[in-house]
Amino acid sequence: MRFLLTSMLWSLLCVAAAAVPARQNPGPPPNVVFILVDDLGFMDVTPNNPESFYDTPNIEKLARSSMRFSQGYAACPVCSPTRASIFTGKYPVRTGITDYISPNRGNQPEKWQRKTSFLPAPYRDRMEHSEVTMAEAFKDAGYATFFAGKWHLGPEGHWPEDQGFDVNRGGITRGGPYGGKRYFSPYGNERLADGPDGEHLPDRLASETAAFIHAHKDRPFFAFLSFYSVHTPLMAREDLKQKYQAKRAEGPPEAWGQERERRVRLVQNHAVYAGMVEAMDQAVGKVLDCLEENGLSERTIVVFFSDNGGLSTSEGSPTSNIPYRAGKGWLYEGGIREPLLVRAPGVTEAGSLCTVPVISTDFYPTLLELAGLPARPEQHLDGVSLTPLLHGAEVMPARDLLWHYPHYGNQGARPGAALRDGPWKLIEWYGEGSAELFRLDVDPGEHYDLADKEPERVAAMHQRLRAWQKETGALFPTPNPAAAAALHPAGAALAGLGWMAGHWVHQTPALLQEEAWLAPVGGHMLGVHRDRPKGGNTAFEFLQLFENAGEVIYRAWPSAKTAVDFRLIGLEQNRAVFENLEHDYPTRIEYRRAGDQLIAEISGEIDGALEVRRWTWKLQP
């Protein structure tokens, strides 16, 4: 009934919105200026965080004339996939670009060097020409199109000029300003002529954008300013660096937390990063001033967004996303919740706030509708138009927001996926077989995992996540042979598995799980596993470890069915890996001991997708 009422309300709102055209002002179609910042955190700008260490007066001024979104999401916690989602209106899993594009393919599975338990999934290293990009849609409608700054969506032949942009100033293969003097001229960028020695890159990109706007003020244009800022390398103008060094001396001391094995910054006080943020803000101001000076502000749509969260756990950890958890590379809110402002003259109310969750796939259909252009539903499959929200509607039809990141981020995260349903957010970690559940309306910092208390909700959300992954052809991590090979040779050292012995228990209100192992005696270890769900039937499994012909075998009889054998392929202190590639599921079993905890993990493919299941038990006295 709640869903039916929501749908009826949404239909009425859509009818009302349709009665008020997106373009209320007569005359030529509106221009579009899309400003995308790299690695800018939600809390890095003063409209979202008045106490921010960084001064962003121009972004604050823009917010006063715009609608601000408190729950705007990037479709991925790293750059290239989110950028592709903006231009295509599709989730990254559909475009195949699910990780940042590495020109040397170092993050592809065939060149993977890290001894992780799994190999990351393969991904496409370019945005295909078959995609009808947002720029192409505007160009087809007679708009002049312009791109400046970071592209990072493929090699030459797949640069902005090949994807619908008339002009390209600086968009190449690389994901950062890594040529020349990097953030200062000479740039060493084949699509951006060098300026005077020492010229600052963000200012130059803003100047190029302003020049294009001025030259095309008498015809509709689509300008995409894509800052390299505030991505590493961390470099700032000397005057701004000194300003924030002085400001830091008056502020609180540094503070650090822990996100798994990574330190995470808890206080904003990095002087160089602060200078980078303010320089970016000044460049935004230059573009907005150009619109004003040319009399275009009242007929130009402006979007301000970031491609992923602030960098807080790696490469200098220059910013803090507190109260949001973690940052770039992570599926927690710090990695995917972005600053988002939309100014659509005649549509958005100045200084308004929208609290409805939206995502980067939504820009494509939204901007087409605001410009009075026909939708391209066959292209922007995953986006929905936000124009009712921009008109002031306070609800959206029920929909899941989804993420699939089958990679190990440089920032410490591991492969995973996420689904947001209203206030609920499920995160699944592929390499651990574990899931976390958070209620964001009361716990935006994702401190309290409710998965054990809401098993039915977890199961339902996980089922929808799997259905979406199957429908989109998602690729998954696979077991890493090098990780097992890196362990000590297995041999027949059954005595080396003695750390598994004990009575291990994990209990939730809905389920009691137990596993017990006897110590190795006479070449054997005997064990039993039992699951006792509340109100359900008990499932059990007899287990045995034994030596045979110089190998250690793990034999399992699940619920008294036919026994299955797995061969020990790797052993180190407190970790053992068993494998049977001929078995349907699982093909791999792993045990790890951490203090008084025993972690068991099974993995293999189900319907072509990696399925990992994990149990964690505590040693009983």
Image (cartoon, grey):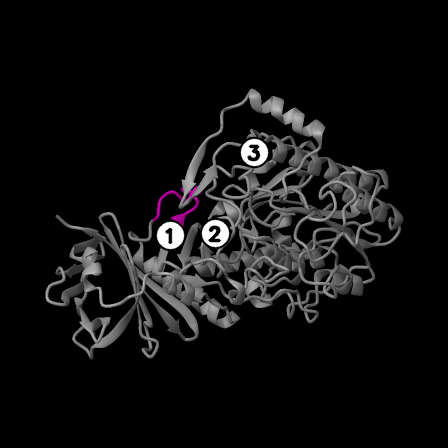
Q: Amino acid at mark 1?
A: Leu
Q: Is residue 360 left or right of residue 5?
A: right
Q: Amino acid at mark 2?
A: Leu
| Residue at figure coordinates x 50%, y 24% from the top left | 252
Which numbered disc covers residue 437? 1
Which span is picked out in magenta? 437-449
Furthest toward the left, the residue is 522
Distance Cα–Cα, label 3 vs label 2: 21 Å
**Which residue carries the number 2 mark?**
331
| Front residue of this view, candidates 91 and 260 | 260
Query: Which is more N-terminal, label 2 or label 3?
Result: 3
Which numbered disc covers residue 174? none
- The spot of residue 153 in percent (x, y) is 67, 60
Query: Which is more N-terminal, label 2 or label 1?
Result: 2
**Which residue carries the number 3 mark?**
49
Q: Is residue 95 left or right of residue 610?
A: right
| Front residue of this view, candidates 102 and 533 | 102
Label 3 Cα neighbours within 10 Å, binned few <14 / some 14-19 / many ≥20: few
Query: Which is more N-terminal, label 3 or label 1?
Result: 3
Numbered disc 2: secondary structure:
loop
Numbered disc 1: secondary structure:
strand
Could you tell me what secondary structure mostly forms the magenta stretch?
A: loop
Q: Amino acid at mark 3?
A: Asn
- The spot of residue 104 in percent (x, y) is 62, 61
Q: Is residue 368 left or right of residue 585?
A: right
Q: Mark 3 or mark 2, which is nearer to you?
A: 2
